[in-house]
Amino acid sequence: MTTSIGTGPGRALIAVYGLFSLAAGSRAAVQIATRFGEAPLAYALSAFAAAVYILLTVALWRGARRLALVALGIELAGVLVVGTLSLLDQAAFPDETVWSVYGKGYLFIPLVLPLVGLFWLRRRR
């Protein structure tokens, strides 16, 4: 029996992803519009993170389990790769992204959120 992923605590997950979509998207839009030349990689990665968050919000809202799983995998890989690279090569990241230092600027929520999402989807089979 399949249970909806957007009910109960899943609604809170959708709300958090919606909030992160707005926060990351707004931040990236301002950075790209006003100072893209200062840190193009960082700002493009923030925009990519926002796109992943938007995709996750919609996938969870619609109950698109497979799409949500893929997007959560992309998010987790992004946080781990960008987080590690931002520590190893600080010159490549003169300004922070949403995923820099594993989401330090966002209280490490970007690191924990995909794990919570994967846990939630696994429980809602």
Image (tube, rainbow, N blue to C red):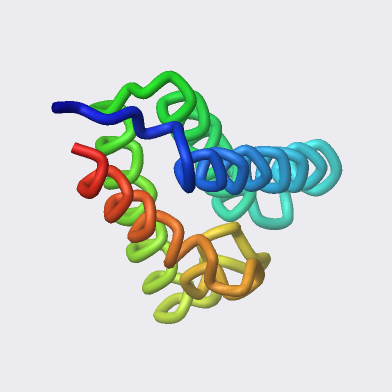
**Is 63 above or below relative to 30?**
above
Residue at horizontal 50 percent and vertical 61 percent from the top: 110
**Is 6 above or below relative to 46?**
above
* Residue 4 placement, left or right of 7: left
Which residue is at the front of the view, 107 or 105? 107
Locate residue 108, reporting x and y percent: 53, 72
Q: Quarter holding the N terminus?
A: top left
* Residue 39 placement, left or right of 91: right
Q: Which residue in the rendered view is the most extreme toward the bottom?
A: 88
Residue at horizontal 34 percent and vertical 65 percent from the top: 80
Locate residue 45, reporting x and y percent: 53, 47
Q: Is residue 119 visible?
A: yes
Q: Is residue 36 visible?
A: no
* Quadrant assignment, res 71: top left
Q: Quarter holding the C terminus?
A: top left
**Is 61 above or below relative to 74?**
above
Locate residue 121, reporting x and y percent: 28, 43
Which residue is at the front of the view, 23 or 30? 23
Locate residue 29, reporting x and y percent: 75, 37
Residue at horizontal 33 percent and vertical 60 percent from the top: 115
Q: Which residue in the rendered view is the most extreme toward the right?
A: 34
Which residue is at the front of the view, 6 or 53? 6
User: How many numbered markers are drawn?
Assistant: 0
